[in-house]
Image (cartoon, rainbow, N blue to C red):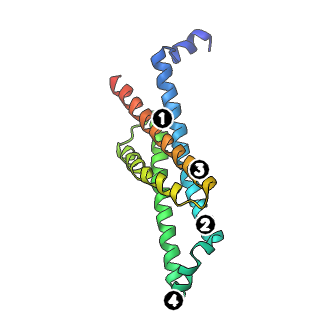
Amino acid sequence: MNKEERRDLLPNTEQDKLFRRRCDTLAVAGMGVIAFGVWSVLKTALFCVLGREAFADTLQELAEYPGAIVAVFGVIALIVLIDLALRLVIGLSARRESRGQNVGVGYLVLVGWFLTVETPMLVVSILSADGLLDGIIAGVVQVTEMVLLIELWASAIYVRRQKKAG
């Protein structure tokens, strides 16, 4: 394939470049959402294994009731797995849309829901941290996740508008 044939395949107008950049951003942001989902599973698992002292009193009280501790950890695991599943839906849908496949608006609704939930969680994670450094780290992670979701949303809307415009 010579240069002329390649130039015809990928037009290089500014609008085409921006469209390809937004598609790439959509794919990368989708993978980022999945990575944050895996991170939340790992963080929760490590907290349950290593941070038992934090809720040792509650565990002592629950020890009186058979199966209560298992039920509590089961509910925690269920919540974390639902969170991971929702993030997988968002991430995989964003990647599919970045490759030009038709995807419904459901994943964008989930992105809006996550942004709505993440905003108060930012304040909670900073205020509930053990120290200043922990609060700063938690805040940076939350803000990074929010920026990622906003970038995903903006890229998805741009890609959809460009596809609709033809």
- x 46%, y 55%: residue: 121
Q: Contact, CB < 8 Å: mark 2 with mark 3?
A: no
Quick one: SS at disc 1?
helix
Q: CA distance from mark 4 to mark 3?
A: 39 Å
- The amino acid beneath tag 2 is Phe
- Label at residue 47: 2
* Front in this rendered view, residue 123 or 86: 123
Mark 1 or 2: the one toward you: 2
Q: CA distance from mark 2 to mark 3?
A: 19 Å
- The amino acid beneath tag 3 is Ile
Q: Position of residue 163 (x, y in %)?
A: 37, 27
Point out the tag, 3 or 1, that comes first from the N-terminus: 1
Q: CA distance from mark 4 to mark 1?
A: 50 Å
- The amino acid beneath tag 4 is Pro
Q: CA distance from mark 1 to mark 2?
A: 35 Å
- x 59%, y 72%: residue: 54
Q: Which residue is mark 4?
A: 66
- The amino acid beneath tag 1 is Ser
Mark 3 or 1: the one toward you: 3
* Front in this rendered view, residue 166 or 105: 105
- Label at residue 136: 3
